[in-house]
């Protein structure tokens, strides 16, 4: 029987992919732990890999762990073993590298000769949970990955050389120079009814799934106290390309114009005495994910337990997990230009103590 640890991979990537999908994307799916499947009669080392390449990041991470085994006669408690670092980490450092492939003018992909050797680092701030903490080992590189152009496309092949076998996977790059958010202002109303707003963005190369997130920043000031910076953030959901509306070759995600006021009602409640609040920036974030990541998230439903069946989907040859790509773009909308005059007027008229700086 085999137990697989899926832990930190997407907690780290969520800092980058928020994971988004967090998408993940962002998220619960990626921090689960698979258990118990009759893959082999005898023990064999099984490698589990999670990696999301992001062309916008100065550091990219790949999580590489191993299976641990038990038998029906001597079962292993996955909850206990997951707390032991040596149960999931390979001893030493594996020979793990990423090979660059390029296609020009639609021709076949060929190796460019560039190979990025992954180093290891220990992350020291893993929060308490079902897996060992606070230290976690990850593989990483600070080399940047190339984005696609009109004439040149890139793929990247992950290769992990072990003593007995080789693990590999490939992914295209999500992103490109054209991927951007078109929406430069937002409108919300205290009594919105069924009125909607729209977030519009230009598609990303190789993306098959998107998540749109919003955030509202504001400050609170009380007599004799330091200023407190507040942030409300929320997701408008994750959608595949086939589920998105389009306008003029752009993707569109709609939102209720009452959303911000509903969030503020929940956050502020009756806390309206002796406090001044100042309107800050509004944030729009769009995260795009690759096909492999989308397939993995769709097929591997979240589990509230450390134990679930082995994934039906993996794009890791010789192992399990997912190697894919994602990218995030954002628009930071200033309170002066990015938040509509109607929204500001209604915020100032509420009894929440909002002011403009």
Image: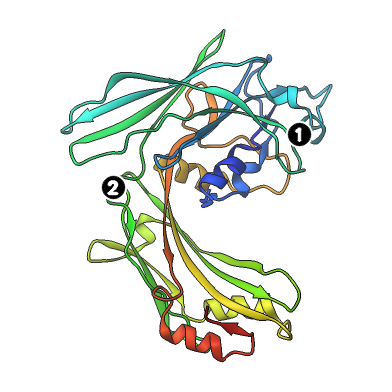
Mark nearer the N terminus (1 vs 2)? 1
Q: Position of residue 202 (x, y in %)?
A: 30, 57
Residue 75: quadrant of the picture = top right
User: Height in image: 211 above or below 89?
Assistant: below
Given this view, does label 1 or label 2 mark the residue nearer the observer?
Answer: 2
The image's mark for residue 132 is 1
Q: Secondary structure at mark 2?
A: loop
User: Foreground: 341 or 64?
Assistant: 341
User: Foreground: 74 or 323?
Assistant: 323
Residue 351: quadrant of the picture = bottom right
User: Height in image: 216 above or below 164?
Assistant: below
> Residue drawn 51% across and 52% down?
23
User: Height in image: 223 above or below 134?
Assistant: below
Q: Secondary structure at mark 1?
A: loop
Q: Position of residue 341 (x, y in %)?
A: 42, 84
User: Height in image: 184 above or below 321?
Assistant: below
**Quadrant location of the N terminus in the rendered image:** top right
Could you classify mark 1 by the number of other residues whose Cα lies within 10 Å: few (under 14), some (14-19), or many (20 or more)? many
Q: Position of residue 94 (x, y in %)?
A: 57, 16
Give left or right: position of 291 versus 109.
Answer: right
Q: Residue lying farthest left?
A: 105
The answer for how far apart the CA atoms under marks 1 and 2 are is: 39 Å
The image's mark for residue 12 is none
> Residue drawn 62% across and 78% down?
277
> Residue drawn 40% across and 32% down?
144
User: Foreground: 173 or 42?
Assistant: 173
> Residue drawn 73% across and 40% down?
306
Q: How many marks?
A: 2
The image's mark for residue 177 is 2
- Is residue 287 visible in the rendered image? The answer is yes
- Is residue 1 visible in the rendered image? The answer is no
């Amino acid at each position: 029987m085999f137990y697989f640890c899926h832990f930190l991979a997407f907690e780290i990537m969520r800092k980058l992919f928020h994971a988004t999908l967090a998408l993940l994307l962002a998220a619960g799916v990626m921090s689960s732990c698979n258990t118990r499947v009759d893959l082999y009669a005898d023990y064999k080392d099984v490698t589990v890999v999670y990696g999301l390449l992001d062309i916008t990041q100065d550091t990219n991470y790949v999580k590489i762990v191993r299976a641990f085994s038990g038998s029906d006669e001597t079962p292993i408690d996955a909850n206990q073993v997951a707390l032991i670092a040596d149960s999931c980490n390979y001893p030493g450092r594996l020979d793990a590298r990423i090979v660059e492939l390029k296609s020009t003018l639609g021709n076949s992909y060929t190796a460019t000769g560039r190979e990025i050797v992954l180093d290891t680092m220990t992350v020291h701030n893993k929060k308490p949970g079902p897996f060992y903490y606070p230290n976690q080992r990850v593989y990483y590189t600070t080399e940047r990955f190339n984005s696609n152009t009109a004439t040149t496309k890139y793929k990247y092949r992950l290769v992990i050389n072990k003593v007995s076998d080789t693990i590999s996977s490939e992914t295209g790059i999500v992103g490109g120079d054209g991927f951007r958010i078109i929406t430069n202002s937002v409108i919300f109303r205290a009594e919105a009814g069924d009125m909607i707003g729209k977030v519009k963005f230009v598609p990303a190369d190789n993306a098959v799934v998107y998540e749109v997130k919003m955030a509202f920043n504001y400050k609170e000031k009380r007599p004799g106290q330091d200023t407190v910076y507040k942030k409300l953030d929320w997701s408008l959901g994750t959608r595949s390309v086939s589920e998105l509306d389009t306008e003029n070759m752009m993707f569109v995600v709609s939102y209720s114009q009452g959303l911000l006021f509903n969030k503020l009602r929940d956050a502020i409640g009756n806390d309206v005495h002796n406090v001044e609040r100042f309107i800050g920036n509004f944030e729009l974030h769009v995260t795009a994910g690759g096909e492999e990541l989308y397939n993995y998230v769709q097929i591997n439903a979240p589990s509230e337990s450390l134990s679930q069946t082995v994934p039906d989907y993996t794009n890791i040859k010789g192992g399990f997990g997912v190697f894919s790509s994602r990218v995030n773009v954002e628009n930071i909308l200033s309170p002066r230009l990015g938040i509509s005059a109607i929204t500001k007027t209604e915020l100032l008229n509420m009894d929440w103590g909002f002011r403009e700086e």
